Image: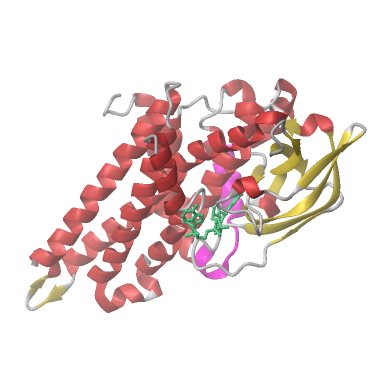
Amino acid sequence: MNFELTKEQQMIRDMVRDFAEKEIAPNARHVDQTEEFPIDTFKKMGELGFLGIPFPEKYGGVGGDTISYAIAVEEVGRACGSTGLSYAAAVSLGASPIYYFGTEEQKQKYLVPLASGETLAAFGLTEPNAGSDAGGTRTKAVLDGDEYVINGEKCFITNAEFARTITVTAVTGKDERGKNIISAIIVPTNTPGLTINSNYEKLGVRGSNTCEIVLEDVRVPKENLLGDPNTGFKQFLYTLDGGRISIASLSVGIAQAALEKALNYAKERTQFGQNISKFQAIQFKLADMAMEIELARNMVQKAAWLKDNGKPFTKESAYAKLFASEAGFRACNQAIQIHGGYGYMREYDVERYLRDIKLMEIGEGTSEIQRLVIARQLGC
Ligand SMILES: Cc1cc2nc3c(=O)[nH]c(=O)nc-3n(C[C@H](O)[C@H](O)[C@H](O)COP(=O)(O)OP(=O)(O)OC[C@H]3O[C@@H](n4cnc5c(N)ncnc54)[C@H](O)[C@@H]3O)c2cc1C
């Protein structure tokens, strides 16, 4: 593993950072307060190739690696948590499963418009009664001639209202041991019987689109089944392993923004006749924040490197997601503390960082589930 970014990775970082600082950050407060999904930003990100970073050029992508993509998520997240979450979900959950498991035809039809940034996709796994216990999926897909008929309900699905397709997980049968077989099926969002609502009032990542989905006798061609019908469960576990790298990266980005704000503020704010950055109590907070962010970033890059090199990365992506989200939450909390009463006010942004980063301890597997994943990898 190389601790220096390659020229290509640096180029992607510089390009995304430049765009994020100029186009995303100035809109972040607005997006949070109005809960408006930044669709114009996504159009521009699409035109610049951001949505296709980890996909090959032949599928409309940029041909970059996971490290480059993780860096891009960090930079977008540093500018705006809401935009960062929708970006990470669009690439890691919307497009990636089609890239990993799709047939050539599915890739041409569904991945190319996603990677080239023409549209977005969503991933519908969570249900009202099946969250951490995704094996408890109740949505059913029954084969009727050449079509699957899908019935069920999904909740908390990112980007669904702006997506052209949603990959939904559904029970398609029973295995020889009588256990449910869960498969993934690509559902175009204009299919009759599919209802998408986004009525949630969220604590943070408020500009990211989060939806409830109801499927009532939704019919899709049987060719829309993604990958091997019998290993759908394994497929989404792999998808989540990849997604965790991006949630970890997003945590690093938000925490980095909090550190920068807190450091600048500490150097400007005077109490007892000196800058508060001269107080050791404040210095130690900043030192801990900087150290944990750097460690989290290294963990993200190691997990990404393992993935890029075809090595197992389940444990490392869980390490990265768990540590980055929890360390990031601590950093955002301390950024408010360093700002004192001003930190509690919207105009200083740090309260938004704390609200946004809380999601990272919940989405794509809660912290408790990450600890279970790690324990299992340890052989418990
Ligand atoms: C803003 C947002 C965006 C999201 N986007 C998507 C998306 O795009 N697609 C998608 O499919 N899902 C999405 N989710 C859903 C998210 O992944 C789930 O909320 C998460 O996995 C937790 O599931 P749950 O909410 O049902 O909580 P539960 O599973 O009910 O968990 C409740 C509590 O119990 C704990 N717990 C559960 N099981 C165990 C156990 N075995 N051991 C110890 N503790 C346990 C949990 O850690 C948690 O603390 C999103 C959620 C949010 C809030």
Q: Is residue 181 left or right of residue 294?
A: right
Q: Is residue 278 left or right of residue 262?
A: left
Residue nearest the viewer, comparing 153 with 272: 153
Magenta stretch contains residue 43 = yes
2 shown above or below 166: above
Q: Position of residue 288 (x, y in %)?
A: 19, 54
The residue depicted at 32 percent of the width and 38 percent of the height is 299
Residue nearest the viewer, comparing 125 with 351: 125
Whether residue 99 is visible to the viewer of this picture, yes or no, is yes
Magenta stretch contains residue 27 = no
| Residue 183 location, quadrant | top right
Which range of residues does the magenta coloring cover? Answer: 30-49
Q: Is residue 195 left or right of residue 324?
A: right
Q: Position of residue 58 (x, y in %)?
A: 62, 20
Whether residue 17 is visible to the viewer of this picture, yes or no, is no
The residue depicted at 51 percent of the width and 65 percent of the height is 32
145 shown above or below 361: above
The residue depicted at 71 percent of the width and 21 percent of the height is 104
Position of the N terminus by quadrant: top left
